[in-house]
Amino acid sequence: MKIPAPITALLVSTLVSTGLTACGSSGSKVSVDNVQKAADAVVAAPTTPCPAGFDLDAALKKAGVTATAKPGSADDAAALAMSATNALQGSPLKTSGTSMITCVYTLSTGGTVVARLTGAHTGKAITVLKPLLHADSDASTSEVDTFVAQKFSTGKPALTPGGKAAVVELDATGGDVVLDVTSYSTDKGDEAKNPITGEPLRKLAEALSKQVKI
């Protein structure tokens, strides 16, 4: 599996430099306004714990993955965010009212899990996510375009082509909210054993989607 650049750099370079425009979710509804407020708090203090309410150890157990997790990684804080509040005028985040919270975990078995909550006041949140899904999944542009264009069932995770990322549309108020989850290796010498992919990743995303409290 290709090891991506540090997550912070990927977020900034992809969403700031790409000319995207956004084109509206789990048991209890997730508020887009609250996603934005939580993102604002993380922007102010990037080392704060993930505000989404995730219990990754419990989710890993539900997914049948024998591993434990701790917040953060060698490259990134436990929580990172980008918010429509302080986005540049005319940028994709500002025009769609989109905020994004990225929660990072290191696995005891090696590798990293990234759970990203994206809320858009206008249009579909997954549209803004498209370049990140392309990087996470290693799928072709056309494959990602087809994946993003499909109709998602609320609360039911869908795997990107190749099974390296999973997306769940959440029941939301005030817009559209999606959760995407991916896992990658931090070990160049033995990449195959570390990342969570395919059905275990889908189950992990499903478990995490049911935990969201924001």
Image: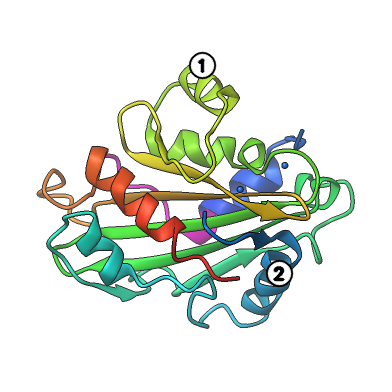
Q: Residue at x 61, y 51 (%)?
A: 171
Most foreground residue, 79 or 35: 35
| Quadrant of the drawing holding the C terminus | bottom right
- State left or right for residue 94 relative to residue 206: right
Q: Which residue is mark 2?
A: 34
Which quadrant of the figure has residue 137?
top left
| Quadrant of the drawing holding the N terminus | top left
Q: Assign the magenta stretch its main secondary structure.
A: loop
Query: Does residue 128 lie above or below 117 as drawn?
Result: above
- State left or right for residue 100 relative to residue 57: right
Marks 2 and 1 close (CB-CB < 8 Å): no
| Amino acid residing under circle 2 | Asn
In this picture, which residue range is highlighted in magenta?
1-9
Report x, y in % for residue 182.
Answer: 37, 49
**How far apart are labels 2 and 1 at the CA level?**
33 Å
Q: Residues within 10 Å of mark 1 (few under 14, many from 20)?
A: few
Q: Residue at x 83, y 52 (%)?
A: 94
Q: Which mark is drawn over residue 142?
A: 1
SS at mark 2 in the image = helix
